[in-house]
Amino acid sequence: MPRFVDQAKIYVKAGDGGPGCVSFRREKYVPRGGPDGGDGGKGGDVILVASSQLHTLYDFHHQTHFRAENGRPGMGKKMKGRDGKDLILYVPVGTVVRDAETGEILYDFTRDGEHFVVARGGRGGRGNARFATPTRQAPRFAEPGEPGEERWVILELKLIADVGLVGLPNAGKSTLLSRITAAKPKIADYPFTTLTPNLGVVKLSSERTFVVADIPGLIEGAHKGVGLGLDFLRHVERTRVLLYVLDVSKDKECLNDFELIRKELAHYHPALLEKPSAIALNKIDLVPEKEKITAIKAVFEEKGFPVYPISAVTGEGLKELLEGLWRLLQKTRMTGPLK
């Protein structure tokens, strides 16, 4: 399976237009035929197309230069040169295209099949037949083709998911994803087990499904790129709902964890705090004193969050959590993901 790559810088060059032709009609019994040079062909475009079959920018990791075909020169008998073939490059849905020099967003792919011409081919030059006039009956010149556009662009993949799991390393996000979906993320008891985002589909029934993203855990300073911070935060942007996964076995420390996560989200993009959210108090199987869980749950409910005590290991509370997330998603159906 291709390695997950969520950012790439590539050079694209559209095809140059073909030159026009300088030619004169030469036939038996027509000793002084007029100009008949044809136009050059248009250069090929470089076109980006979104594909739901792709989930990584790995194809752009090793090859970074892409050129479309040039237009062919014009020919005699006013024959136009063949247009250059367009070059089509496929990118995952969720890819943002930026100009590498200015940082300007050129296009944002959010649907399968969307296409964007990132570099336009040059126009073909006109042949000398185009320049004939009553006073200039034998022009001996033609136009060169126009050069195709060229630029460096940055491709940046932001996963599109219904629910994004956010939490500190070892909060149990990967274990939770493996229990509620068919995804098989790497799971171990040390920080940053999850180095790349994982997607899974929750199926409550044939008509009730949603996509969950387990994103690398973040730490303090993530918005500055500390740890896996920027990789983490980039993928949070498009999710419709955030599920804060907190380790309740750390007792009241999970309150501090929650505030740290919220602070990092706010530094990166304040609008992330406005997303519909819920809280999963994970690892309740490690807390024998159930009153502690009740007390912590009450604190978060006072803040206005729906709270679900769960154990990703034993499965306790997962049904209630998933039904709650489905209800929350229905409330946000009419609103699109953050751009």
Image: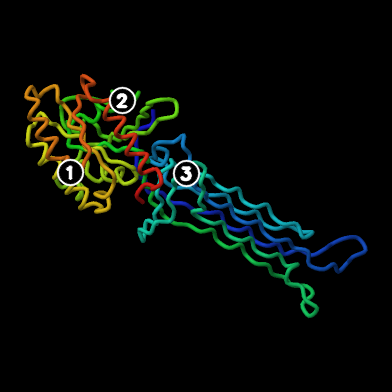
Q: Which of marks 3 and 1 is nearer the N terminus?
A: 3
Percent of width and height locating residue 156: 36, 47
Amino acid type for the residue under numbered disc 3: Arg
- Is 89 above or below relative to 294? below
Amino acid marked by disc 1? Ile
- The Cα–Cα distance between marks 2 and 1, rounded to whole angstroms, is 23 Å
Q: Name the residue under label 3.
A: 111
Residue 4: name its quadrant. Answer: top left
Q: In terms of depth relative to the viewer, which is nearer, 114 or 315? A: 315
Looking at the rendered structure, the secondary structure element under dot 2 is helix
Residue that carries the numbered disc 2 in the rendered image: 180
Q: Contact (CB < 8 A) between labels 3 and 1?
A: no
Residue furthest right as drawn: 29
Q: In this view, does 50 lie to the left or right of 303?
A: right
- Which SS class for mark 1? helix
x then y, percent, for residue 134 = 80, 78
Which mark is in front, 2 or 1? 2
Which is more N-terminal, label 1 or label 2? 2
Q: Against 154, is 290 above or below?
A: above
The image shows residue 89 at horizontal and vertical percentages of 49, 44
Mark 2 crowdedness (10 Å alpha carbons): few <14, some 14-19, many ≥20: some
